[in-house]
Amino acid sequence: MSTVEDPLRFLVRLIHVEKMLPPLPGVHETLLADLLKMGAEDLLKVRAQLAAEVRRAADELLGNAAFASQVDRLPFAAGSTVVGFGDSLTDDLQSWLEILRQVLEIRRPKDGIKLVNAGASGESTTQMLFRIPQVLSLDPACVICMAGTNDARRFGALPLTQVSLTETRRNLTAFADSAAKSGHSRWVWMTPPPVIESRVTGHWFWTPMATAWVAADVQAVGDAMRGFGAPVVDLRPTFAGSAADDLILDDGVHLTLQGHKAVLRAVVAKLAAE
């Protein structure tokens, strides 16, 4: 199975101008198309192709009777709001959250469950901290948070992560405290998936930014996350050993569609069991 993503599709998946600028109907698509040096119609075609693949992924998952039964048992009440909070691993147009959106539309269409993608590509937990009030203002019944990959990001030869582990722990604590104070939003953690250092090195997307990751740094974030009281979906077993080869893209950080399906299977199994 190929893990190499076409550069144009890769950028369309992860760059969402509409989340960076005020609402300007029609302008965002034109601006992004110009940035990517492609026509607006071509951009929409790529997005439609990505969406169609997500829909097929949802159909494939629901073809498994055990998974479909777990979806039926997800603790999401009719009319409730569920927020996916994170970085590009959630913001991705083919992310686990976007597949979940389709899964719920297919399997539980009458429930009217609203999914909000509050992922923002490139953000660390420090940047996400400032978006917590906005997320909780949506009155979500559940917030599923996958964060910390960008905290572990390194630049050039500096032996430092973008966010220290101490600050990451502080930020995660603030997330949990804010949710607890809201009094009604259930918080669910997902540990960040591992990175493949050898794929990051020399990749066309990371090289201009002198960006690197050390697998142990990402592992440490996951360890810290497991110390909190809220339910934790530990994704590391899902990506253990050679399994990661097909689940992580050639950039070493982002996930293939199969990778996002694996993430969704893990989180659905965890929530359905509770």
Image (cartoon, rainbow, N blue to C red):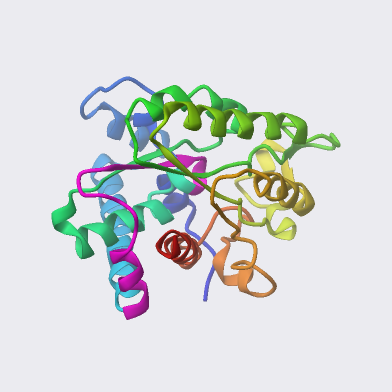
Question: In the rendered view, would you say 167 is above or below 83?
Answer: above
Q: Name the quadrant of the C terminus.
A: bottom left
Total numbered labels? 0
> For residue 48: magenta?
no
Position of residue 155 in the picture relative to residue 251 (left or right): right
Q: Is residue 261 visible?
A: no
Position of residue 47 in the picture relative to residue 14 (left or right): left
Question: In the rendered view, would you say 244 is above or below 198?
Answer: below
Determine the image quadrant of residue 139.
top left
Residue farthest along the left direction in this orientation: 110
Determine the image quadrant of residue 234.
bottom right
Position of residue 170 in the picture relative to residue 16 (left or right): right
**Which residue is at a point 74% across and 56% down the rendered structure image?**
197
Question: In the rendered view, would you say 222 is above or below 67?
Answer: above
Give the magenta range.
64-89
x and y percentages locating residue 77 in the rendered image: 26, 49
Q: Is residue 148 visible?
A: yes
x and y percentages locating residue 207 in the rendered image: 69, 44
**Which residue is at a point 82% across and 34% down the rendered structure image?**
160
x and y percentages locating residue 251 in the rendered image: 61, 55
**Which residue is at a point 49% across and 64% down the rendered structure image?**
266
